[in-house]
Amino acid sequence: MALAPDTDRRRLWPWLTVWTVVGLGIRFATVYGRPHRVPGGDPGYAWGVANLLVAGKGFINPLSYGFHNQHIVVQTAGWPPLWTFFLTIPPFFGFHSFFAARFWSCIIGALAIVVCGLAGREIGGRRVGLIAALLIAVYPNIWMNNELASSETLSPLVVALVLWTAYRFWKRPSGWNVAALGASVGFATLCRDELALLAILIVVPLVLLVRSAQWRRRVVLLVIAGASASVLVFPWVGYNMSRFEKPVYISDGLGPTLASANCGVTYSGTFEGYWSLECMKGVAYKYTPTADESVNFARTQTIGTKYIRAHESELPQVTLARVGRGFGFFHPLQQVKFDSYIETRPYHWALVGLGMYYALLALSIGGTIVLRRRRIPVFPLWAIGLDVLSVFVLSFGQTRYRVTFEVSLVLLAAVQLEWFWSKLFPGRRRSAIASPEDALEPPEPASPVPVGA
């Protein structure tokens, strides 16, 4: 006998609140443990843009603005805007320090615990959601980004939101649910522009699999999803088109990425499959600080592309190194050292994160099998991994770029752990199905035909 929805909510939220508090405590402790961190790299850049935005200067390059105190205004779109928007909240209320930004980053990171718990509940029931929330709360590869105040703080939240709305639509394919799914993908695109691929990898297949609807209805659902995503994304695209000499859509950071990842240093030797600051200095830093960013970055993209074409025979090996490095199978201990030295991640916690990653990866295989046997689609979860794969192929192997896929691994691992629990305590199995709408088989007749991976 399934639990009533109200009863299920009463049993879900107390424990979900506990795990959120635990996760928030871990994150706060890491910030207080390193209170004097100096802003630098990508987090420092985003924090600088956020403070200038609150000051009414617009989205401008903080390095150019502070160049010899000349207050040079150069428009920037080096990264998607969503994390910068979130970072404006502390200075808007008068908290301008980087410590405040890190503190706020921890709160955003804790919100991901809640949404991931809700996504897990939608996939496999209340217990799966609670296990997933606990894993997100304690997983170092997630919370280390919060302490750094990097944009990857927001990635678990937006990916969990996409997966939550995806499975809600799969169970109840309505116009409102597909609008929520489209909006979540648009929201994710403003966080990381490569997540726009989820429209093709998740939204389109889910809509086409709604066999209870006529083809005309499916087309309407696709239009609704596209419209809801466009409402969020197009204003930013239009803003970029109005302020740069060359076309810029979500961001224009591909050029420096290609320049730093495609040179002799990154095609062999210690940094194979990684990026190089020396390559960036030799190419991207030669432009004048007053020039249009889109023009400067287009030049770096041209230089990076020329190097790729001149070394096409080496590209397969380098691509394998990038993918292996990003997914933790090519010099993983060296990568941990890079993360510690270059990105200032805590070395020992990074080792713990690597071990947990391997464990989650192993459990996710079992979780995939369990979901397939329960006739629940797994392709939305693995689609995140395919999206991350494309990032590694086009750029370089980086641990923090993997964080979006690690949300999927947490959810799949939670399914497998819940299965173990049900075998150890078979008398409590019924509580895994939280309510009729959370049943592991899709409801009839409104649901699409279940599919596998």
Image: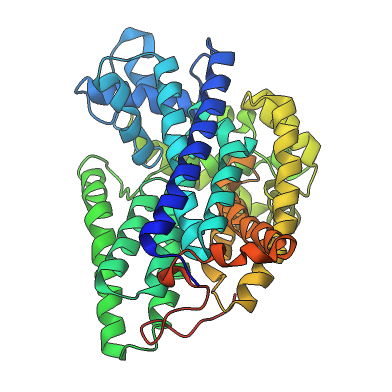
Left or right: 243 as drawn, with respect to 192: left
Colour convention: rainbow
Residue visible at 68% across and 40% down in the picture: 274
Rendered location of residue 262, percent (x, y): 63, 44
Q: Report whether residue 272 is seen.
A: no
Provide residue 148's location: percent of width, then percent of height: 53, 26
Visible residue check, residue 175: yes
Instruction: Say which quarter of the image contains residue 83.
Output: top left
Q: The C terminus is located in which quarter?
A: bottom right
Residue 184 in the image: above or below residue 341: below
Residue drawn at x 27%, y 41% as measured from the top left = 244
Taking depth in this image into account, of 8 and 305 the one nearest to the observer is 8
Residue at 44% over, 45% down: 114
* Residue 428 position by quadrant: bottom right
Residue at position x 42%, y 17% in the image: 98
Where residue 313 sits in the image (x, y, percent)? 73, 59
Q: Nearer the viewer, residue 450 or 155?
A: 450
Quarter of the image for residue 376 reads bottom right
Residue 34 percent location from the top left of the image: 58, 14
